[in-house]
Image (spheres, helix red, strand yellow):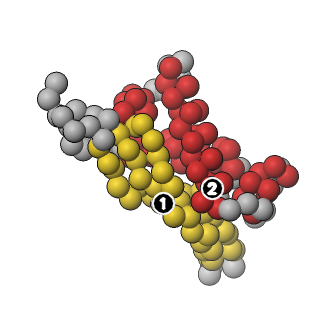
Amino acid sequence: MKIIITESQYKLLFESKLNNTMQVVINESLDIIKNNCEEENYFDMMVCDGAEIVEEIKVIEVNKVTAKSERNNYETTFFNITVDCYIDYFKPTYDLASFIDELVFEARGIVGGRTVDITLRDTINKRKNFDW
């Protein structure tokens, strides 16, 4: 199976520093999610709740991973991006699973194909006072 990508997507993925490139992809994905939430384009409100409280996402590490299927001798390469999310929320923690799933979807749309996977390393609450 071959994945066809554009020349700009190729340059984005293979001809630049990965951490900086993936930070740009993550920032663009976050902007897309926030814009879609403003226009009420999502059915899953957990995505918009997550987008509302996320202030910043920092790329910590990018690994290029190759997986091979022994059954049909198929090999694929993808990028595993480890991120930290900085939130402002009135509780110390918040479950960002739906938000991260949507972030992966949007990042894959920017990069092209199923070449991106995002792992949430930590959720850091920037709020110091948890009183309403």
Q: Residues within 10 Å of mark 2 (few under 14, many from 20)?
A: few
Say which quadrant the N terminus sits in.
bottom right
Residue 20 shows which numbered tag?
2
Residue 67 falls in image quadrant:
bottom right
Which residue: 22% across, 32% down? 90
Say which quadrant the C terminus sits in.
top left
Q: Residue furthest front?
A: 128
Q: Position of residue 61 (x, y in %)?
A: 51, 64
Q: Position of residue 81 (x, y in %)?
A: 53, 59
Q: Using the image as rendered, state which of residue 27 and residue 114 is in the foreground.
A: 27
Secondary structure of the residue carrying numbered label 1: strand
Distance Cα–Cα, label 1 vs label 2? 10 Å
Give the amino acid at mark 1.
Ile
Which residue: 21% across, 42% down? 92
- In the image, residue 112 sits, relative to residue 75, either above or below, namely above
Q: Which residue is mark 1?
A: 60
